[in-house]
Amino acid sequence: MANNNNKDKCNVPHLRFPEFSGEWKKSSIREQFELYSGNTPSRMNKNQFDGSINWITSGELKEHYISDTKEKISEEAAKNNSLKLLPVGTFVIAIYGLEANGVRGTCSITTRESTISQACMAFTSKMDIQNEFLYSWYKKHGNIIGIKYAQGTKQQNLSYDIIERFNISYPCMEEQKKLIRFISLIDQRIATQNKIIEDLKKLKSAIIYRCYSSRTNMVSLYDLLKQCSERNRSGLDLQVLSVSNKYGFIAQSDQFEDREVASDDTSNYKVVEKGMFAYNPARINVGSIALYEKDGKGIVSPMYVCFTTEQLLLPGYLKHYFASQTFRQEMYKRLEGSVRLCLTFEGLCNIEISLPSIERQENISKYLSTIENKVSLEECVLSQYQQQRSYLLSQMFI
């Protein structure tokens, strides 16, 4: 790689393969690509969604390549709705709902002939820029484009008129091809890493299902749980915690983006320590229940339910039960409320759980925790690959 120290003086990237020189050209999207947006066939006619033609929606643009879609339409639907059959290699972006994180900048390239919904925009090259080059360019700029140029109040969208006016800088075809091959190597590593993580999560889910769907030796949680209600009466300066459905116990300031929502007086907050569970009764339906596994103490809002387990039930075994489909099914049966559904501690205690020996509980817990730790490790590796890719895009594309 060659560094360009005069980036501000000419239209070239910061990093470049040494065999290439000279400025990159600049052109508008309108000059280089044909743009097309689709639509949604009427669902009143079920036959229109009873075909074999891919119909891409914005939520499916998650990977570099898209080969299959959740819904498929018939040839009649494509014809009746003037849906263009896009060739293999078409570049597609999401243009609706860009107010949501995770939607801005999403894009894919088709590996099969496909149609698209009105929430997508398709690009086919007509001059000097390959669609694969455009993919990497958009991965660099797409999020910022969505933030700066999407229009709308409740729903923010990008329009044809906005997109076609963007300028794109690009090198000669030979340099484009080398850039594409280079970035593709990183994309392949990312795809492989995602597959490793996906397979580990599937393995964990399969083991949880097998272990916790059994109906043998069923015992009511009423006999196995003990509610805790210790308050921070002494006013200790303990960290205020929340329970996230993804990360478990986290600092409340992390959940609310550095905003302190706790009361200045935390004397009525509940104390949690290692081995205790806590959940918000109004958020357990989205998985916000966790085991506190750190040393030391913290405090949670008075609205939380806190409890420990009796000796016959290991906390680690119960922790994985709460991640099971079996628990979710039992929980939903016991939710109460009209405006907001809640699970009381009494409702939780009415659930029965399959209770094996302590030795087997420990084995199950350790094995599942080993998989969890492996997932965390592989996710760190994935994050490193993604950071590497972002850096290279920022340096090798204009």
Image (cartoon, rainbow, N blue to C red):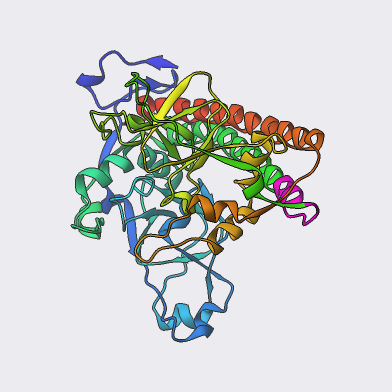
Q: Residue 16 falls in which quadrant of the image?
A: top left
Return the x and y of residue 8 as percentages of the image width and height.
21, 20
Looking at the image, residue 235 sits to the left or right of residue 226; the answer is: left
- Residue 159, relative to residue 309: is it above or below? below
Q: Point out the image quarter for the C terminus.
A: top left
Report x, y in % for residue 291.
55, 34
Left or right side of 296 for 207:
right
Looking at the figure, which quarter contains the N terminus?
top left
Magenta stretch in the rendered image: 206-217
Instruction: Residue at 70% x, 46% y: name it.
Output: 208
How many marks do you count on the picture?
0
The answer to if 66 sits in the magenta stretch is: no
Residue at image location 37% in from the left, 71% down from the top: 39
Residue 125 visible in this rendered orientation of the protein: no
Residue placed most toward the observer, 206 or 151: 206
Residue 18 visible in the shown view: yes
Q: Is residue 326 above or below residue 80?
A: above
State which quadrant residue 189 falls in: top right
Q: Nearer the viewer, residue 347 or 325?
A: 347
Q: Position of residue 98 (x, y in %)?
A: 30, 52
Q: Residue at x 41, y 23 (%)?
A: 20
- Left or right of residue 215: residue 134: left
Residue 396: percent from left, percent from top: 38, 27
Nearer-the-camera pick, 251 or 22? 251
